[in-house]
């Protein structure tokens, strides 16, 4: 009987486990939290990137990587979660606004949007796309209705959308529960992986004490802990990795979502607003960036904020977004109690923040599945890419 361990029940690990289980492989799904999808996959903005935001990567390698993920995101997940979550919990299409202080000039952004828009035309009928088929620059009148023209130089309406990650999480929880071959091993933290002659020994601890089991194949889908676990297997990192803990605000008040457009400000330390059905997400980068560190993994897994820090984060996020987006001030002036702070790690190659033009955070194409025999380590890169890489690792294991 073939047995596999999938470590980390984020979107990547969960979908990997579901793929393997459907193919008859017995999977132990390890997760340090008490429930799956509470890490980055449960708290992110849910944007299914087409690559517009990666305007600093003029090679288009990042956009092309994101487009691969967007092309199959829905088709892969629909197998387990059905279509309702895609019909009822996706966002309005994103507008991109370019402040005068943008790190990239407007002409380069225009050219990038035209190229990405063109590439997105070939994604196929089941891709995660808005009804609008292409990106277009908005008129001065449209810009003035939404944004402050004193701060915003131009805006583009795009064919990009987001999915509410929490709604997707709930749908996936049922799929994992119903799956025949997945054994959920939650509240279990894995600390090492070694070859043991016949297979791979996975060791860690749960509430009862030490755990240690052997498998034919192991998938490391632990995101911000990935490189640390790789190191226990003897895999050395080839470059620096940066781990940023980023928070945003979520609201489940339908009246907040109602008046909110889906918007991203580029390029630099700005923010986003997203409205998906009855829920909303907003973030302001300088307020929401709680920590940034370079190393194998961040020093702390779970970051707790003081009540003063929480109040400041909410106030500063809403204040700064309102300044740029006065057209949404109704939603953005909602009472602080309407908002819940959510946050998680974003891990990527490099060692400098997004305020550096040469930061590797401006490109995300060096991601994907790394295999060494039956040991597979997945750098998801973005939520957009998780189903793509999960199916890729599953087919490597099934080969
Ligand atoms: C605020 C924010 C906004 C974002 N917005 C977007 C967006 O709009 N679009 C987009 O494409 N991407 C976005 N991202 C990035 C995206 O969320 C991640 O790329 C993606 O969710 C990573 O998925 P994953 O399954 O690899 O990791 P995770 O979802 O973090 O899953 C990894 C799991 O492994 C578990 N784990 C870790 N170490 C161990 C261990 N030793 N033992 C057992 N379990 C362990 C963790 O608890 C976690 O549940 C955002 C991220 C953040 C934080």
Image (spheres, rainbow, N blue to C red):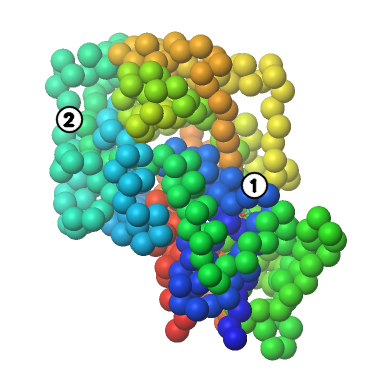
Report the front residue among 21 and 247.
21
CB-based contact (under 8 Å), mark 1 and mark 2 = no
Residue at the image point whose x is 28% and y is 49% from the top: 128
Relative image position of residue 29 (x, y in whole percent): 61, 64
Relative image position of residue 113 (x, y in whole percent): 23, 40
Residue at the image point whose x is 25% and y is 46% from the top: 129
Local SS, label 2: strand
The mark that comes first in sequence, 1 or 2, is: 2
Left or right: 113 in relation to 192: left
Q: CA distance from mark 1 to mark 2?
A: 38 Å
Local SS, label 1: strand
Report the front residue among 278 and 188.
278
Q: Which residue is mark 1?
A: 294
Q: Which mark is residue 196?
A: none
Relative image position of residue 34 (x, y in whole percent): 68, 49
Left or right: 39 in relation to 44: right
Q: Which residue is mark 2?
A: 137
Quick one: label 2, few (<14), some, or many (20+) residues within 10 Å? some
Quick one: label 1, few (<14), some, or many (20+) residues within 10 Å? some
The yes-or-no answer for disc 2 within 8 Å of ligand 1 is no
Residue located farthest toward the right when viewing the structure as drawn: 209
């Amino acid at each position: 009987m073939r047995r596999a361990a999938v470590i980390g029940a984020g979107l990547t690990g969960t979908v990997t486990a579901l793929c393997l289980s459907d193919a008859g492989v017995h999977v132990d799904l390890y997760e340090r939290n008490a429930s799956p999808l509470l890490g980055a996959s449960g708290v992110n903005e849910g944007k299914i990137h087409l690559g517009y935001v990666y305007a600093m990567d003029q090679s288009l390698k990042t956009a092309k990587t994101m487009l691969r993920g967007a092309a199959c995101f829905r088709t892969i997940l629909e197998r387990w979660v059905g279509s309702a979550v895609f019909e009822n919990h996706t966002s309005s299409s994103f507008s991109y606004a370019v402040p005068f202080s943008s790190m990239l000039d407007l002409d380069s952004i225009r050219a990038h949007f035209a190229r990405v828009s063109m590439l997105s035309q070939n994604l196929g009928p089941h891709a995660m796309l808005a009804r609008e088929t292409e990106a277009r620059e908005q008129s001065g009148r449209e810009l003035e209705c939404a944004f402050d023209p004193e701060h915003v130089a131009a805006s583009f309406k795009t064919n990009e959308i987001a999915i509410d990650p929490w709604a997707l999480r709930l749908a996936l929880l049922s799929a994992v529960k119903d799956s025949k071959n997945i054994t959920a091993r939650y509240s279990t933290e894995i600390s090492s992986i070694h070859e043991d002659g016949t297979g791979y020994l996975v060791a860690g601890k749960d509430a009862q004490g030490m755990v240690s089991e052997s498998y034919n194949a192991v998938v490391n889908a632990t995101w911000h802990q990935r490189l640390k676990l790789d190191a226990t297997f003897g895999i050395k990192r080839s470059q620096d990795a940066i781990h940023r803990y980023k928070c945003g605000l979520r609201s489940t008040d339908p009246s907040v979502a109602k008046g909110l457009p889906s918007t991203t400000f580029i390029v630099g330390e700005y923010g986003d607003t997203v409205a998906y059905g009855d829920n909303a997400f907003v973030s302001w980068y300088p307020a929401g960036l709680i920590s940034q560190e370079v190393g194998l993994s961040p020093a702390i897994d779970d970051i707790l904020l003081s009540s003063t820090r929480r109040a400041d984060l909410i106030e500063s996020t809403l204040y700064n977004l309102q300044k740029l987006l006065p057209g949404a001030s109704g939603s953005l002036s909602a009472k602080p109690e309407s908002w819940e702070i959510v946050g998680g790690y974003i891990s990527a190659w490099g060692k400098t923040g997004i305020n550096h033009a040469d930061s590797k955070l401006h490109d995300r194409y060096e991601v994907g599945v790394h295999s060494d025999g039956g040991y597979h380590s997945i750098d998801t890169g973005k939520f957009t890419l998780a189903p793509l890489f999960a199916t890729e690792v599953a087919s490597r294991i099934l080969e």
